[in-house]
Image (cartoon, grey):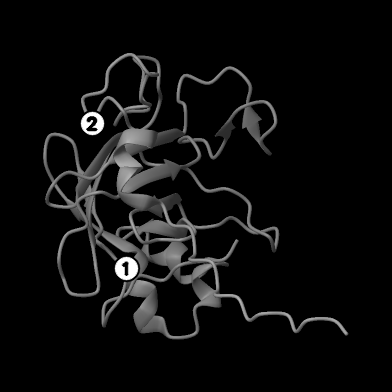
Amino acid sequence: MLHPTPILKETPSQTAGPYVHIGMTPNFAELRGVYDDPGATMLSEDTKGERIAIVGRVIDGAGAPVADAVIEIWQADAQGSFAGPAARHSNSAPSFTGWGRQAADGDGVFSFQTIKPGAVEGPDGRPQAPHVSLWIVARGINIGLQTRLYFADEAAANEGDYVLNKIMDKRRRQTLIARREEGPVPRYVLDIHLQGEKETVFFDF
């Protein structure tokens, strides 16, 4: 007679652990010479388009800053083209990388120096509103969170955007709209709330 199979405990889920900054942005953690961090800017002298800064904070469900978050952004250039020959509508010799990675500081703050993106074609064949894709990972997050940043001064384009219109509650769409602050370089400000009443809309792309 076979022995009964014992009931085993579930293996704990893997998380990004407490070493996100060390692994993904070693220079930020003062570990030099591992590899070059992508940095906070995607610009070169030849990059065309309106220079802007994207600034925000990552905040947990209790309203506290997430000090070990890492944020990646990906976007089109000012003409609506993506960097890299494999990308749709790609610019094979870009002066704009279209991708960056930054570690949040002790207050959960991140910032990127970039340009305002142009419109790209959506799944329905119509232009999407200008936007930036964001990916967030931090201690306790099992799978990186994907979301978008839209621009408050693109209200007409936002109103018809394919993805924004998939969010049934219009009030939730506001969690993706960055406000513009004027200055020598305009800033678009968007806070990322991981949980709670102001939770940002995240996507399963």
Question: Does residue 50 appear in the picture of this structure?
Answer: no
Residue 189 x %, y %:
22, 54
Circles 1 and 2, Cβ within 8 Å, touching? The answer is: no
In the picture provided, is 78 more to the left or to the right than 125? left
**37 relative to 113, above or below:** above
Disc ID at residue 115: none
At horizontal 26% and vertical 83% (from top left) the residue drawn is 197
Residue 25 x %, y %:
33, 32
Q: In which quarter of the image is the C terminus?
A: bottom right
Which residue matches tag 1? Answer: 194
Residue 71 x %, y %:
35, 46
Separation of residues labelled 1 and 2 (CA atoms): 23 Å
Which residue matches tag 2? Answer: 29
At horizontal 45% and vertical 71% (from top left) the residue drawn is 159
At horizontal 88% and vertical 85% (from top left) the residue drawn is 1
Of residue 88 and residue 140, the one placed in the foreground of this image is: 140
Mark 2 surroundings within 10 Å by alpha-carbon count, few (fewer than 14), some (14 through 19), many (20 or more): some
Quadrant in the rendering for residue 196:
bottom left
Quadrant in the rendering for residue 62:
bottom left
**93 relative to 22, above or below:** above
Residue 35 x %, y %:
40, 19
Q: Residue furthest front?
A: 1
Of residue 65 and residue 127, the one placed in the foreground of this image is: 65
Q: Choose mark 1 or mark 2, whichever is in front.
A: 2
User: What amino acid is found at the position of numbered circle 1 in the picture?
Assistant: Leu
**28 relative to 54, above or below:** above
User: What amino acid is found at the position of numbered circle 2 in the picture?
Assistant: Ala
Question: Does residue 183 appear in the picture of this structure?
Answer: yes
At numbered mark 2, what does the secondary structure look like: helix, strand or loop? loop
